[in-house]
Image (cartoon, helix red, strand yellow):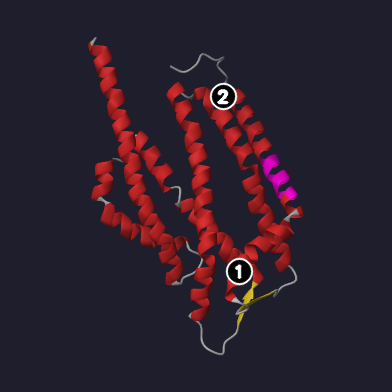
Amino acid sequence: MKDDAPLLSFWDHLEELRWRIVKSILALLIGGIVSLFFSDRILALLLLPLDKLQGTVRLVNLSPLSMVMVRLYIAIIAGLLVGLPVIVYQAWSFVAPGLYPHERRAVPWVLISTFLLFVIGASLSYTIMPFLFRVLVEAGYQGVENFWNIREYMGFLLGFMGAFGVVFEMPVAVYILSVVGIATPAGLRRSRKYAIVLIFVVSAVLTPSPDPFSQIAMAVPLVALFEVSIGVSALVHRRKKRRREAAESENAQ
């Protein structure tokens, strides 16, 4: 059963939600402002994937506001990462009183897994960027120099990393669907071939570039994650079965 706690009215819940949203927004603003002071270091880190191209690509600034927008992009994304623990804590504090004890034990692990999988996905995309950029450069025409707009470069890089981070949440999504009874390991295995087709379609939509190399680079890890998700669903299914059998034996006594 849920813990005994004083009942709050609808307006009390609304007031609490409002203040938790305000605190989350403040965390984002503070994180973004702090990130602005480190924007040069972050920018240098994001430019590293071009170093292995040995000068075959030159970044140019084609607008007076391009660098300002690039720094704003960096501040927003870095601010989101810095403020994410506060946002997660505020969300957890708001929903925790309404959860059962076993649900409270599961939610922190789900939140931690969500964050870690996003970081792993974004980091993996960052590591394959030099290879992807080399493929794109070599696909060009001899005699045509590569001058890339730094704003478009940052949009491509950050968009690709963000897309990778989002799609790496597949095991968490399957876990939640398995807990509520929507997904089953048998059903996932039966739909494997359709899922693979859907993965390539989603990869084509999410990747910021229409080239097939970036789409394949996203699709291959996703297929592997789908297989991992089947294992996650099977684990949830076995736990639910053991819990059901334990409850039945307890009722029989």
Q: Are marks 2 and 1 in contact (CB under 8 Å)?
A: no
Question: Can residue 182 be seen at all in this image of the molecule?
Answer: no
Question: How many C-alpha atoms fall within 10 Å of the one at disc 2: few (<14), some, or many (≥20)?
Answer: few
Q: Within the image, what quadrant is residue 154 found in?
A: bottom right
Whole-Å distance between the Cαs marked 2 and 1?
Answer: 47 Å
Verify whether residue 100 appears in magenta: no
Task: Considering the whole magenta stretch, tell me its main secondary structure.
Answer: helix
Q: Nearer the viewer, residue 151 or 52?
A: 52
Please state the horizontal and vertical placement of residue 246, each as a whole percent of the image: 28, 20
* Quadrant (top left/top right/bottom left/bottom right) for the C terminus: top left
Specify the label residue 10 is tagged with.
Answer: 2
Question: 95 left or right of 172?
Answer: right
> 188 above or below 104?
below
Verify whether residue 29 appears in magenta: yes
Residue ID at (58%, 75%)? 53
Q: Nearer the viewer, residue 100 or 43?
A: 43
Q: Nearer the viewer, residue 45 or 185?
A: 45
> At label 2, which amino acid type do we have?
Phe
Which span is picked out in magenta? 25-34
Residue ID at (70%, 40%)? 26
* Quadrant (top left/top right/bottom left/bottom right) for the N terminus: top left
